[in-house]
Structure formats: structure tokens, C-alpha cells
Image (cartoon, helix red, strand yellow):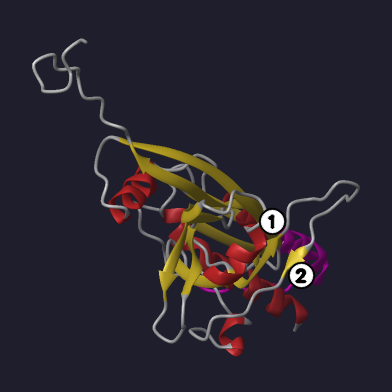
């Protein structure tokens, strides 16, 4: 009975991974042999075969089969890493919230889903501390607690998550800049993007000939998720808040000797 189960497991794993192997031209022939148990996957012209379980009669092969299953799982995990990236971090208005929320766009660039997604915003490390402190913000009403507890990012898909209200982010940064600095926007780069500067200038009805003083504040973020292989992945990165002061450039008028009052005395 155990031998039948293990052979069935091997066949099931290969049946599941066959499309992945087919998508990889370098992996055209895969074979697992353990005692008199033989499961072969041959990819012909990019098409995966329909694999039928092969039952074992030799019980001495069971340990080898179990090892083979472990190696298969490890091979699949190494050759198909689950990778999630932070694509954008922008202020967005959600229908049920009273103010804009810092909204993260997470992109899954792999062919496997990222499960049990968890996000934690972090303070910059203070002098004398070895690790960052977690930051707590008022949650958005757009996503329920039960939904947050089971978030996932589908294979080669993306998801948007509101993580912090604008007012609380401003309180966090209020003592870092002069009082006349305004919030310009947010992003994933410490360098303020040109589109953020242009949008800020447009807000002040300035298209050209302006002077901009700007600075950046940062918030750490830890993104955790599980893989289908029961692995755990942690991604540490930064989110940046942009602040600045803008003013029109003084236009220099050339001296006109012919203008009344401008003639030399």
C-alpha cells in the first residue's frame, strides 16, 4: 500500500510540473527510476504526456522513492523560484476611505503563486538599535481583515494593497522638513521622479521657470509570502515620501535707458 502511495505521489508531481517543464526548452527529458518503479517524462514538441502511475511490487524501493520525491520537490523549488517585486508605491483614493492611502502594487514575476502575503512597514533604525521598529497605521476599509489574512499574488499577476493613510504618513515626517515644505508624492526610488516634480509644478500653476527645493523621507517595508513548496520568502525594501517647496523664478528685465525714470541723472 505504501509503495502504491509513493509511486502515485511521484506520478502526481510529474503530472503537475509537466507544463512547467514543457515551457523550458532545456528540460526535454526527465526520468526517475527507483527499483522497479519507473516514471518517465518526455517532452515532445513542447507537449507534455499524460502520465499514468506505475505501481511497485518491490518494497525495498520505497526508501529510494521517498528520497526521489524529496529531490523532485527540491529540484522544482530551485528551478522555479517564486519572486514578488514592489512595482509602485503611490497615493491612491479608495472608494470607502475618507483620504488617500499609500498603495503598493506587488507583481509576481514567476510562474507560481505567492501565498499568505504579509506586509509590515518599518521605521528607520534609530541610533543604538539593531533592528527597525514596526509601524502601525489605521487600516483601509477597502479590504477586510479576513481578506488581508489570506492575500495571495497569482502567478505572473499583480495585486494592489492600501497600507497607510496620508495623514498618518505626514505626521511621521512632520519634524524632518521646514514647515513650508509640502507633500509631493511617493515612490520606490530615493530620487524624485520627473513626473512627480511636473505634477507638483502643475498644482502650483507653474510649467516652466520655477525653482524647486525638495527632499526625501523613507519608510522601510518587509514583504513576506509563502511558496507552494512550504518555503518562506522575505523581501526588504524602501518606500520614499517626497517633500518640497516651489516658487517661480524671478524674471530679469533688461535695463531700458529710454524708459522714463531710467535715464541717467
Please report contact status of discs 2 and 1: CB closer than 8 Å, yes or no.
no
Above or below — where is 167 with respect to 265? below
Residue visible at 13% across and 13% down in the picture: 257
Which of the two discs, 2 and 1, sits closer to the camera? Answer: 1
Write the start and end of the magenta stretch as one range: 51-72
Residue closest to the eye, 158 or 104? 104
Up-down relation of residue 101 to residue 71 (above or below): below
N-terminal of the pair, mark 2 or mark 1, is 2
Image quarter hosting the C terminus: top left
Residue 57 in the image: state x and y as whole percent: 72, 74
Q: Single out the residue that lies furthest toward the left.
A: 258
Left or right, 193 with reference to 191? left
Membership of 53 in magenta stretch: yes
Q: Secondary structure at mark 2?
A: loop
Residue at the outermost front position = 265
The N terminus, quarter of image? bottom right
On residue 58, the disc is 2
Residue under the point 77% across and 80% down: 2
Q: Quadrant of residue 61?
A: bottom right
Residue at horizontal 54 percent and vertical 81 percent from the top: 140
Q: Residue 107: give x, y in percent of width and height.
A: 47, 59
Circle 1 residue: 74
Q: From mark 2 to mark 1, how far is it between C-alphas?
A: 25 Å
Q: Secondary structure at mark 1?
A: helix
Amino acid at each position: 500500500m505504501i509503495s502504491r502511495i509513493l509511486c502515485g505521489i511521484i506520478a502526481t508531481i510529474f503530472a503537475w510540473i509537466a507544463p512547467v517543464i514543457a515551457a523550458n526548452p532545456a528540460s526535454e527529458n526527465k526520468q526517475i527510476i527507483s527499483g522497479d518503479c519507473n516514471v518517465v517524462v518526455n517532452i515532445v514538441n513542447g507537449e507534455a504526456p499524460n502520465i499514468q502511475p506505475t505501481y511497485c511490487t518491490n518494497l525495498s524501493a520505497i526508501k529510494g522513492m521517498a528520497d526521489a520525491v524529496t529531490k523532485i520537490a527540491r529540484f522544482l523549488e530551485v528551478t522555479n523560484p517564486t519572486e514578488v517585486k514592489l512595482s509602485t508605491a503611490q497615493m491612491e483614493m479608495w472608494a470607502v476611505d475618507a483620504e488617500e492611502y499609500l498603495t503598493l502594487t506587488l507583481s509576481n514575476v514567476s510562474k507560481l503563486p505567492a501565498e499568505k502575503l504579509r506586509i509590515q512597514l518599518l521605521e528607520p533604525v534609530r541610533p543604538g538599535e539593531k533592528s527597525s521598529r514596526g509601524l502601525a497605521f489605521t487600516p483601509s476599509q477597502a479590504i477586510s481583515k479576513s481578506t488581508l489574512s489570506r492575500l495571495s499574488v497569482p502567478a505572473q499577476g499583480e495585486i494592489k494593497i492600501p497600507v497607510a493613510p496620508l495623514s498618518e504618513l505626514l505626521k511621521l515626517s512632520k519634524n524632518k522638513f521646514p514647515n513650508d515644505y509640502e507633500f509631493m508624492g511617493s515612490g520606490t526610488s530615493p530620487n524624485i521622479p520627473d513626473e512627480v516634480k511636473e505634477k507638483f509644478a502643475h498644482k502650483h500653476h507653474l510649467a516652466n521657470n520655477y525653482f524647486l527645493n525638495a527632499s526625501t523621507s523613507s519608510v522601510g517595508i518587509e514583504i513576506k509570502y509563502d511558496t507552494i513548496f512550504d518555503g518562506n520568502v522575505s523581501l526588504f525594501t524602501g518606500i520614499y515620501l517626497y517633500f518640497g517647496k516651489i516658487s517661480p523664478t524671478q524674471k530679469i528685465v533688461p535695463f531700458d535707458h529710454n524708459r522714463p525714470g531710467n535715464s541717467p541723472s
